[in-house]
Amino acid sequence: MSMHLERPSLTTTGKKKGKQKFRNAEQARRARQLKDEWQELLKRHGIEQEAKKRARGLTASAYKAPAPYRRETQHIASLNSKDSCGVATKAPEKVYTGTNIVGIATMHKSNAVPVFSSEDAKDIAKMRR
């Protein structure tokens, strides 16, 4: 299957962000300080990010298809055809009995056309592709 038909979650380029770059050393120091403060705050409130990520990863395991439906009765008895023996008669053949159609003409590429009068037959005979 081609990659353009796959969903966006399947990627070959990876999902991790690259290394963050800062304009100067002061900004980098400030970002590290804020990150450390944030981690300390999470620990103080009892929230551990790594444990949450691990738990979420374990619960989101591979897709499990639901079990197929099975009926309770294993066998359904069919109609007893020995007692009721139905007979169907053949339908009568359908035959045109009217006088409207004179015949059938072939116009172009085996196209059958009904002819209602001799004028129609002459017109069809004179037609070209």
Image (tube, helix red, strand yellow):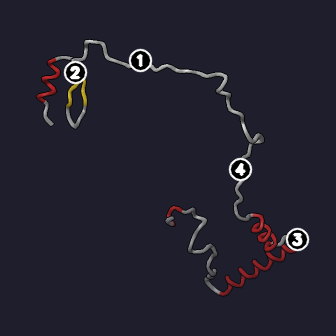
Residue position marked by numbered label 2 in the rendering: 103
Q: Which residue is mark 3?
A: 46
Report the residue at 22% width, 37% height from top. 109
**Residue sitting at x 33%, y 17%:** 95
Q: Position of residue 15 (x, y in %)?
A: 62, 72
Mark 1 crowdedness (10 Å alpha carbons): few <14, some 14-19, many ≥20:
few
Reading the image, the residue beneath label 1 is 92
The residue singled out by tag 4 in the image is 68
Q: Crowding at label 2, few (<14), some or many (≥20) Cα neighbours within 10 Å?
A: few
Pick whichever of labels 1 and 4 is earlier in the sequence.
Answer: 4
Amino acid identity at mark 1: Pro
Can you give x and y, in whole percent of width and height, for residue 69 in the image?
72, 46
Q: Is label 2 or label 4 in front? A: 2
Q: Nearer the viewer, residue 38 or 127?
A: 127
* Mark 3 vs 1, N-terminal side: 3
Q: Sequence order check: which comes first, mark 2 or mark 1?
A: 1
Of residue 22 and residue 17, the one placed in the foreground of this image is 17
The answer to whether marks 4 and 3 mark residues whose Cβ atoms lie closer than 8 Å is: no
Tell me the mark number nearer the camera, choosing from 2 and 3. Answer: 2
- The CA span between labels 3 and 1 is 88 Å
Tell me the quarter of the image containing the C terminus. top left
Query: Which of the two marks, 1 or 4, is nearer to us in this view?
Result: 1
Q: Nearer the viewer, mark 4 or mark 3?
A: 4
Measured in 3D between alpha carbons, the distance from the residue under mark 1 to the one under mark 4, in whole angstroms, is: 48 Å
Depicted 87 relative to depicted 7: above or below: above
Residue 15's disc is: none
The amino acid on which the numbered mark 4 sits, given as a three-letter code, is Pro
| Disc with the residue nearer the chain's start (2 vs 3) | 3
Dot 3: within a 10 Å radius of its alpha carbon, few (fewer than 14), some, or many (20 or more) residues?
few
User: Considering only order in the chain, which callout, 4 or 2, is on the residue closer to the N terminus?
Assistant: 4
**Where residue 54 sits in the image (x, y, percent)?**
78, 71
Q: Position of residue 117 (x, y in %)?
A: 18, 17
